[in-house]
Amino acid sequence: MNTYSIGLMPGDGTGPEVLDEGVKVIKAAASKYDFKLDFQKYDFGGERYKRTGETLPAEAIGDLKKHNAIFLGAIGHPDVKPGILELGILLKARFALDQYINLRPVKLYPNVATPLKDKGPAEIDFVVVRENTGGIYTGVGGASMVGTDQEIATQVMTYSRHVVERCVRYAYEYARKRNRKKLLTLVHKCNVLTHVGDLWVRTHEEVGNADYTDIKQDYNHVDACTMWMVKSPEFYDVIVTSNLFGDIITDLGAMIQGGMGIAAGGNINPDGVSMFEPIGGSAPKYTGKNIINPLACICAGGMLLETIGEDEAGAAIDKAVHDALASGKIKNLSAGKMGMSTREVGDLVASLL
Ligand code: IPM
Ligand code: MN
């Protein structure tokens, strides 16, 4: 029997509550599909930072690398200045573990309300492959004469061919494996960002022409993409894009799929340790109330299993989430409006596996 070691980072706010349900569901999948999961918990987050001043210490990185995957609840604490935990824990883990892909499915499940008029599950079902360790997030740049009226600041969008190509290749492979429309849309802003945009455009084209002639290529400027995501989301299959553009369009994606309660993501290193998370944040005001929606975390758990090689179990979790929503028992995806508690939603999905 295969055994996998999973690092758990419950984090802040409602993170621990949703992660409990995510773990409940992947455990249920493990017993059904005959594999074993060992868990090790870490206390990185706002409380530890307040106690020790530590975010993600260097020795922790080595420890995290020993696992088959990491499962994260949420990072963000109301008493800690914005940026410290995000940069010190979330971004640090992504960079240190070279999780260069951020995979974000945008999928509308049955009975879930979308703000898009006349669109349903058949129209909203695509995946964003966001480059996750490069671009403007590398922090290259600086500031001078700060605080004077001469102040200048730069934050550079840096991309190498290597970093672009490994991301684009992952996206082509993903479009092939997904086997739907076999369409890979590059989203960028090459009409203005002539240097970096050109690098992405040429890489997308050259890699596709050389190795993925079974996948159709398309291109959208990022501003137009936000328009099409609202007007004709059915147009998309797989989108590949740079870090900042991906950050922005996946929040829009989360909204059209029914909100943060259902939006999951994976920070993926295809040759290393990947980290899965609900993308909604720590929702401090709902902490400890047993009313937060755990579905995003449960979906992230399904992605985790798929990525460690338990494809069937991962697909079964996705189907169980689908069936739970199709049953009509979950009234609404917002915290406190589900008509069920956090734990009851976890139980429902686990029972449908
Ligand atoms: C996300 C978040 C992070 C990001 C923040 C918290 C640093 O918005 O995961 O999308 O910008 O990547
Ligand atoms: Mn974001």
Image (spheres, rainbow, N blue to C red):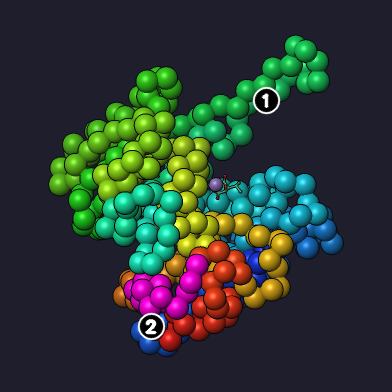
Residue at horizontal 74%, vertical 16%? 151
* Above-or-below relation of 86 to 30: above
Which image quadrant for residue 184?
Answer: top left
Give the residue number, with chain letter if any, for mark 1.
Answer: 142
Look at discs 2 and 1 and give the one toward the viewer: 2
Q: Residues within 10 Å of mark 2 (few under 14, many from 20)?
A: some
* Above-or-below relation of 6 to 221: below
**Residue 108 position within the rendered picture, expressed as x and y whole percent measured from the top left:** 37, 59
Which image quadrant for residue 310?
Answer: bottom left
| Residue 326 colored in magenta in the image | yes
* Above-or-below relation of 17 to 138: below
Q: Main secondary structure of the magenta part?
A: helix
Q: Which residue ends up furthest to the top in the rendered image?
A: 150
Q: Is residue 81 visible?
A: yes
- Give the magenta-colored segment's residue range: 317-332
| Residue 1 colored in magenta in the image | no
Front-most of residues 152 and 108? 108
**Residue 218 position within the rendered picture, expressed as x and y whole percent measured from the top left:** 25, 36
Give the residue number, with chain letter if any, for mark 2.
Answer: 353
For the C terminus, give its image quadrant: bottom left
